[in-house]
Image: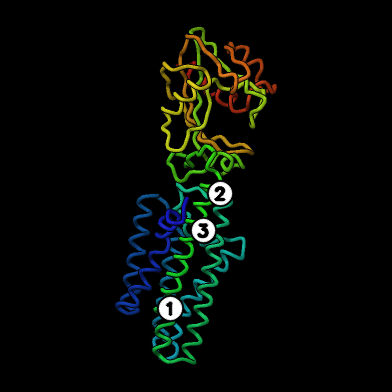
């Protein structure tokens, strides 16, 4: 997930507060408060209709808006009026500070309802937290400047610092972050240019990013799509391949007839045909979709698309990928389960076959 996607996803959580600040500056505090509260109520009703649950974080947003509005109304005079922007930013500093420097990430909790289809691995979480830390110090420094300007500088200087300078600082921050993100992206592409790249997907199979093979296989978190095709002959025997000893994962164990990663941008149907041709020399076959599930190991996270195919023609195994291949009777497979003969993933698939295919 890139920063722009993350920003678009998290933005709705901040809309009521942003609307209050904008409406306050345009129409004044009283009207601004009314506009923001009405927007928050509409958001709450829409969320309840859509999710059928009371969203406590929308209520928290509304409560924060009311507090800001009341404080703004109470401080509508002289020096206190000048301190109002600093007070608002101080509340943001408090929220950001707790999120960054304590185990409770309020910012993430407040926006969790908008992140149902987004996965953040450990590296992305660290990047997100780093961004919050920068914002914390930015808000804090600007708050101190506002207070100083309110007491010791002219009204014009105060107006620039509390208004224009705020937008300039954020513009500079986002431009720097954009440049850094682009440089990181170029460096990543160059570093992994000779590797296969996989799409990173959510549990529904929606593509949210892409990454090289070695990064995907550096631990669970970056879920990428794979295909499994179970080959069954007319006697209900299941063809299995014995994984080569050179394989990184489960070397030397019997596994699904066809299994492999989808390349970035590759469709599931194209991927299963490519893998079947590469591993077993099969080019003409029909595959029935059976299941989709998430499979996690200490090495990786996969979204498995499982298929089954009836096939009685000659199978030519790829000796570079597969050590051996043969048909197994279902009875023999049952006798060998949980004895270290098969990969754990095949044993999981086998249960699905028994429950959802051979009963058809």
Residue at figure coordinates x 51%, y 26% from the top left: 228
Say if 29 sits above or below 36 in the image.
below
Dot label at residue 165:
1
Q: Which residue does the numbered mark 2 point to in the structure image? A: 121
Could you tell which of marks 2 and 1 lies nearer the N-terminus? 2
User: On the picture, is 339 further left or further right than 21?
Assistant: right
Say if 128 sits above or below 288 in the image.
below
Callout 3: SS? helix
Q: Nearer the viewer, residue 24 or 47?
A: 24
Of labels 1 and 3, the one closer to you: 1
Q: CA distance from mark 1 to mark 3?
A: 27 Å
Residue at figure coordinates x 50%, y 60% from the top left: 180
Callout 2: SS? loop
Could you tell which of marks 1 and 3 lies nearer the N-terminus? 3
Q: Tell me residue 131's x, y (percent).
A: 53, 63
Say if 113 sits above or below 268 in the image.
below
Say if 85 sits above or below 258 in the image.
below
Q: Which residue does the numbered mark 3 point to in the structure image? A: 108
Could you tell which of marks 2 and 3 lies nearer the N-terminus? 3
């Amino acid at each position: 997930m890139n920063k722009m996607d993350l920003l678009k996803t998290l933005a709705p959580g901040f809309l009521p507060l942003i609307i209050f600040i904008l409406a306050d500056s345009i129409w004044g505090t009283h009207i601004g408060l009314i506009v923001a509260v009405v927007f928050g109520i509409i958001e709450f009703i829409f969320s309840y209709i859509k999710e059928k649950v009371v969203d406590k974080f929308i209520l928290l947003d509304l409560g924060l808006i009311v507090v800001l509005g009341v404080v703004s109304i109470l401080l509508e005079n002289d020096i206190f009026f000048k301190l109002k922007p600093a007070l608002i930013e101080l509340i943001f500093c408090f929220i950001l500070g707790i999120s960054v420097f304590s185990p409770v990430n309020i910012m993430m909790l407040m926006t969790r309802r908008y992140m149902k289809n987004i996965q953040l691995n450990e590296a992305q979480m660290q990047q997100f937290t780093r961004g919050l830390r920068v914002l914390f110090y930015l808000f804090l420094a600007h708050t101190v400047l506002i207070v100083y300007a309110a007491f010791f500088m002219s009204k014009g200087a105060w107006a620039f610092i509390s208004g224009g300078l705020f937008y300039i600082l954020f513009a500079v921050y986002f431009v720097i972050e954009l440049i850094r993100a682009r440089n990181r992206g170029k460096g990543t592409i160059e570093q992994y240019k000779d590797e296969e790249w996989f799409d990173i997907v959510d549990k529904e199979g929606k593509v949210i990013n892409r990454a090289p093979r070695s990064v995907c296989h550096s631990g669970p978190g970056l879920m990428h799509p794979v295909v499994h095709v179970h080959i069954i002959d007319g006697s209900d025997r299941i063809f299995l391949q014995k994984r080569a000893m050179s394989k990184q994962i489960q070397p030397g164990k019997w596994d699904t007839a066809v299994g492999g990663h989808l390349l970035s941008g590759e469709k599931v149907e194209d991927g299963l045909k490519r893998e079947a041709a590469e591993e077993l020399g099969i080019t003409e076959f029909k595959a029935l979709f059976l299941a989709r599930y998430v499979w996690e190991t200490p090495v990786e996270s996969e979204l498995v698309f499982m298929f089954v195919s009836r096939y009685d023609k000659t199978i030519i195994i790829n000796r570079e990928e597969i050590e051996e291949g043969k048909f197994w009777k279902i009875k023999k497979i049952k006798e060998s389960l949980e004895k270290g003969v098969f990969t754990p993933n095949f044993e999981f698939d086998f249960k699905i076959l028994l429950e959802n295919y051979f009963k058809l």
